[in-house]
Image (tube, grey):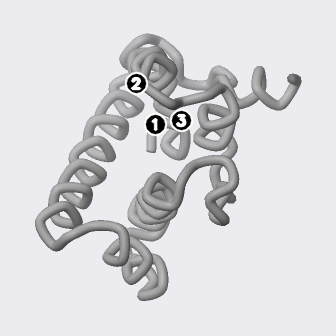
Amino acid sequence: MAVLNKAWYEWDQHAPLLRAAAGIIEDDVFAVLNTPPRATDGKVVDEQHSAVLAYTDAMTLDVTVPEDVFERLKKCFGEKEVVEITATVAAYNCVSRFLVALDVGEKNGQGGPEEEQQAR
């Protein structure tokens, strides 16, 4: 959601954690930066991550989640996990919008890291 909300300060803080996570490759980071659309066929990221990314996109861009996106998430996760994922997406949407509104990190109006990634 940092990318979708253009919260570059938030991206700068969290991207190193993503890159350091076990099993994450640069193509996974590229998939996050180029949203939407994301790789939804599981080829870039696994099905669980892809389902979470699609759900995050829907919550962030439209608030209302299409039934097929929600069903896909529920196939990958239990009820408690779905609630936790939803709470996390909602909370970080709040954070990113707060940061952008207050121009935290003085990054508003600047191009984000996706421009760097598209050049690769």
Identify the residue at the far front of this view.
23
Residue situated in front as seen by the camera: 97 or 101: 97
Q: CA distance from mark 2 to mark 1?
A: 6 Å
Helix, strand or loop at label 1? It is loop
The image quarter containing residue 34 is top right
Q: Residues within 10 Å of mark 2 (few under 14, many from 20)?
A: many
- Examine the rendered structure and indicate whether residue 73 appears above or below residue 105: below
| Amino acid at circle 2 | Glu
Nearer the observer: mark 3 or 2; the answer is: 2
Residue situated in front as seen by the camera: 62 or 87: 87
Label of residue 2 in the image: 1
Give the percent coordinates (x, y) of residue 94. Answer: 26, 44
Q: Residue at x 40, y 24 (%)?
A: 10
Judge left or right: residue 77 versus residue 81. Answer: right
Label of residue 31 in the image: none
Q: Disc 2 vs disc 1: Cβ atoms closer than 8 Å? A: yes
- Examine the rendered structure and indicate whether residue 48 appears above or below residue 27: below
Helix, strand or loop at label 2? It is helix
Judge left or right: residue 29 versus residue 52. Answer: right
Give the labeled residue for mark 3: 6
- Examine the rendered structure and indicate whether residue 69 appears above or below residue 8: below
Residue situated in front as seen by the camera: 117 or 62: 117
| Amino acid at circle 3 | Lys
Q: CA distance from mark 3 to mark 2?
A: 9 Å
Judge left or right: residue 118 versus residue 31. Answer: right
Give the labeled residue for mark 2: 10
